[in-house]
């Protein structure tokens, strides 16, 4: 997202108002409005087969550099959709310098260093298609324990389970020879914003540790990222601790990017002492970008042991193959199309679901 | 909406920042309003409080850009900012505009609402204004399809349900528009998706509108609008389909405008199979404006068959209101207004109500 100065018809009044206090802070407003038309076919008998959605966000950023070189600032992401009822998605402040960067607030943690299959536009396997899936066909994080305990960002196990935007503190090292590391600590996973957890939630003392490498060899870009995330189940919880890792890599050359990742969530957050309940997944994808155009294809495969589906003991697997294209029409205005085929096979062939989703997207970002 | 610089504490660096950004051609405006109202009222309801204050606020972001070939595009987000708002925004959307017309996508008013013509109003809005908020809910006039109140001033439309709309260019004063709304109910607004064909009341809605605007050499100007709204009741909703139309016209000369409209909602969205539940309404009004002053009076009469009424209310009878209003522009962006409304709800079955509402308003718009 790019930042843009607001339009000015009252320059004098506004600057006179702002000057005395934070004269060195640069405040910018950005955000986006997106419209999507979804067309789909599921096993559900009463399938509505199409609907429109819209999403909007406003992002206010304030950034400054102090006389001693300290960079600092704040970031507020206001949720602007007509269906939103919490006011902001993420808020944090940061301080940075030659020593690295510290971020504090309700913001994604060191798991941002993760690498997985490349995508374009709407996002293919990591995109909006799953908004148009019945919740019973979704997999992994959207279910039972995970949904209440840990983020359902993206709904799928692309990377190790993380603390999403729970209130946390994160430290990123500077980049050394292409390497960057980060570590996050969130005392209570369930806790965000002004809320204080006076009693232990489902997960406590959650750490995210990430390491990423970016380099280039003879025109070939190489990106590798790994995560290890862990947390303790609360003393009262009857679920397992969280211990999950993922590893991914991408190679890029002449507009092509190829990559993928593997995630092992183990039996994180599953019922305590339950056996055969590990969840693993892998993904792979290829994109090609040329000027305003981009196309991509990616595949996701999740495997649940017999008791591994967090919705219960269905087990089985979930897979999705998604194609996508995107075109930048004008500055800030993009359009895209994704086509996804998904298949949820439950062990014992009960309640299997499969189908497809096509998403047409128009986004105005500012 | 007025434009203003956001916190302009770093004018120079912000301007510099703007240039290299990818969306440099995009203009972002921040606006909005804060309205405070004092209502003094009397009605037949027991424990009538007789007076209360009310406030309403919005923050509005407008984004505008232009492609190399002259097509204009942009986005809008209207954040609801009153302390009791439980959803974050009311309208969000994207538009594309060229010589071929205007295309809108998102949670926006449709062709019916945009092209309809009714009695002229000023300031707070008289029959189309805030006085209804100071009337007991059971005595209010029939509302929109999602029953937001406000009366049958227009044919029954889809409000801000997620939609696409196309408006033709204006040719010889005529402009037509058509909206398509896959799912009308508010449960499908914003990011929400309605996956079921049997949940909710109305779907596959079309709003058709035709408007004429003419300014004649003798100083007379004419506006006329026709709207037609269609939607299919969903399986299991036990509602009637929507088939509603409205017709209105205004004629203006010098500082005076006179006009009115007629609305026939039939038995739209009422209980399926129910007899005698048609709803019609007419309105008429006059307006005088001079400099910062505006004065207007308007009258609305709604007629419900024996089983018709507000939403699925089957009280029958009629509702009428006579509202006098004035507005004064105190300064740039600052207006004051007063509306005095006399309303009368006569039900065929149930308790009648009548009374008056005086609304005093101060509004700051930026």
Image: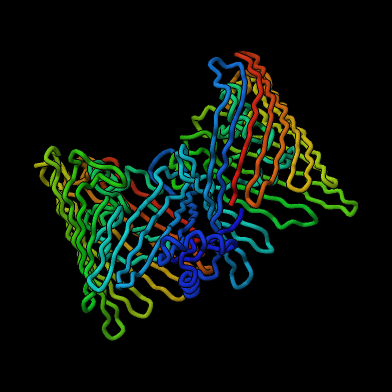
**Residue B69 falls left or right of residue A64:** right
- Inspect this view and state whether residue B119 appears: yes
* Quadrant of the image occupied by residue B355: top right
Q: Nearer the viewer, residue A189 or B364?
A: B364
Residue B172 is left or right of residue B327, and the answer is right
The residue at 19%/58% (across/down) is: A208
Residue A348 lies, in percent from the top left, at 22, 42
Where residue A130 appears, x then y in whole percent?
Answer: 37, 51
Relative to B184, is A174 above or below?
below
Above or below, comparing residue B7 to residue A269 in the picture: below
Residue in view at x 63 percent, y 15 percent? B352
Residue B271: x %, y % from top left: 57, 24
Q: Residue at x 50, y 61 (%)?
A: A364
Pick the front one: B21 or A289: B21
Place residue A127 in its image quadrant.
Answer: bottom left
Query: A254 and B151: which one is in front?
Result: B151
- Residue occupying image coordinates x 79% and y 41%: B288
Q: Position of residue A29 (x, y in %)?
A: 46, 60
Q: Residue furthest left?
A: A273
Judging from the image, the colouring scheme is: rainbow
Tell me if residue A336 can be seen: no
């Amino acid at each position: 997202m790019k930042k843009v100065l607001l339009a000015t018809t009252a320059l004098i009044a506004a600057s006179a108002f702002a000057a005395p206090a934070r004269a060195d802070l640069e405040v910018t407003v950005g955000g986006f409005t997106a419209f999507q038309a979804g067309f789909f076919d599921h096993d559900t008998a009463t399938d509505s087969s199409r609907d429109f959605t819209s999403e909007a966000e406003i992002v206010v950023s304030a950034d400054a550099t102090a006389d001693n070189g300290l960079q600092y600032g704040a970031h507020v992401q206001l949720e602007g959709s007509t269906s939103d009822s919490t006011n902001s998605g993420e808020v944090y402040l940061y301080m940075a310098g030659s020593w690295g960067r510290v971020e504090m607030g309700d913001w994604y943690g060191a798991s941002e260093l993760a690498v997985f299959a490349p995508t374009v536009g709407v996002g293919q396997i990591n995109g909006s298609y799953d908004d148009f899936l019945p919740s019973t066909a979704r997999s992994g994080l959207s279910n039972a324990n995970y949904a209440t305990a840990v983020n359902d960002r993206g709904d799928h196990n692309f990377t190790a389970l993380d603390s999403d935007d729970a209130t946390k503190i994160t430290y990123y090292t500077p980049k050394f020879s292409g390497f960057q590391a980060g570590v996050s600590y969130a005392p209570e996973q369930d806790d965000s914003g002004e809320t204080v957890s006076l009693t232990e939630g489902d997960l406590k003392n959650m750490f995210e540790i990430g390491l990423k490498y970016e380099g280039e060899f003879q025109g070939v870009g190489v990106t590798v990222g790994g995560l290890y995330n862990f947390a303790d189940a609360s003393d009262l919880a009857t679920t397992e601790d969280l211990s999950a890792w993922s590893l991914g890599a991408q190679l890029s050359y002449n507009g092509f990017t190829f990559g993928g990742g593997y995630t092992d969530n183990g039996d994180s957050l599953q019922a305590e002492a339950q056996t055969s309940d590990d969840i693993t997944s892998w993904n792979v994808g290829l994109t090609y970008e040329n000027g305003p155009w981009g196309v991509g294809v990616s595949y996701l495969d999740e495997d649940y042991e017999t008791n591994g589906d967090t919705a219960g003991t269905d087990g089985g697997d979930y897979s999705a193959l998604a194609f996508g294209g995107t075109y930048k029409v004008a500055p800030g205005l993009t359009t895209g199309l994704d086509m996804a085929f998904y298949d949820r096979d439950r062990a014992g062939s009960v309640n299997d679901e499969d189908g497809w989703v096509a998403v047409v997207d128009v986004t105005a970002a500012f | 909406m007025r434009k203003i610089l956001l916190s302009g504490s770093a004018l120079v660096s912000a301007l510099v920042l703007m240039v290299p950004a990818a969306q440099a051609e995009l203009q972002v405006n921040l606006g909005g309003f804060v309205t405070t109202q004092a209502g003094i009222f009397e009605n037949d309801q027991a424990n009538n409080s007789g007076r209360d204050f009310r406030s309403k606020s919005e923050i509005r972001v407008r984004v505008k850009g232009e492609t190399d070939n002259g097509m204009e595009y942009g986005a809008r987000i209207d954040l609801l900012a009153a302390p009791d708002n439980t959803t974050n925004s009311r309208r969000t959307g994207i538009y594309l505009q060229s010589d071929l017309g205007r295309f809108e996508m998102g949670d926006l008013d449709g062709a019916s609402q945009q092209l309809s013509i009714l009695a002229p109003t000023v300031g707070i809005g008289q029959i189309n204004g805030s006085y209804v908020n100071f009337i007991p809910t059971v005595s209010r006039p029939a509302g929109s399809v999602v029953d937001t109140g406000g009366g049958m001033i227009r044919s029954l439309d889809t409000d801000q349900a997620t939609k696409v709309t196309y408006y033709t260019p204006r040719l010889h004063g005529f402009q037509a528009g058509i909206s398509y709304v896959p799912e009308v109910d508010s449960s499908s607004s914003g990011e929400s998706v309605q996956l079921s064909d049997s949940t909710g009341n109305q779907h596959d809605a079309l709003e058709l509108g035709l408007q004429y605007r003419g300014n004649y050499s003798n100083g007379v100007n004419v506006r006329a609008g026709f709207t037609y709204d269609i939607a299919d009741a969903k399986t299991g909703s036990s509602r009637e389909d929507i088939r509603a139309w409205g017709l209105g016209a205004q004629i203006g000369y010098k500082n005076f405008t006179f006009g009115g409209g007629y609305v026939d909602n039939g038995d739209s969205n009422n209980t399926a199979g129910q007899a005698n539940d048609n709803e019609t309404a007419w309105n008429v009004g006059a307006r005088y404006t001079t400099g910062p002053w505006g004065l207007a009076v308007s009258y609305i009469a709604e007629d419900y068959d024996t089983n018709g009424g507000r939403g699925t209310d089957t009280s029958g009878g009629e509702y009428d209101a006579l509202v006098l209003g004035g507005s004064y522009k105190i300064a740039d962006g600052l207006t004051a207004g007063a509306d005095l409304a006399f309303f009368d709800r006569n039900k065929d079955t149930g308790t009648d109500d009548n009374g008056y509402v005086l609304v005093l308003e101060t509004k700051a718009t930026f």
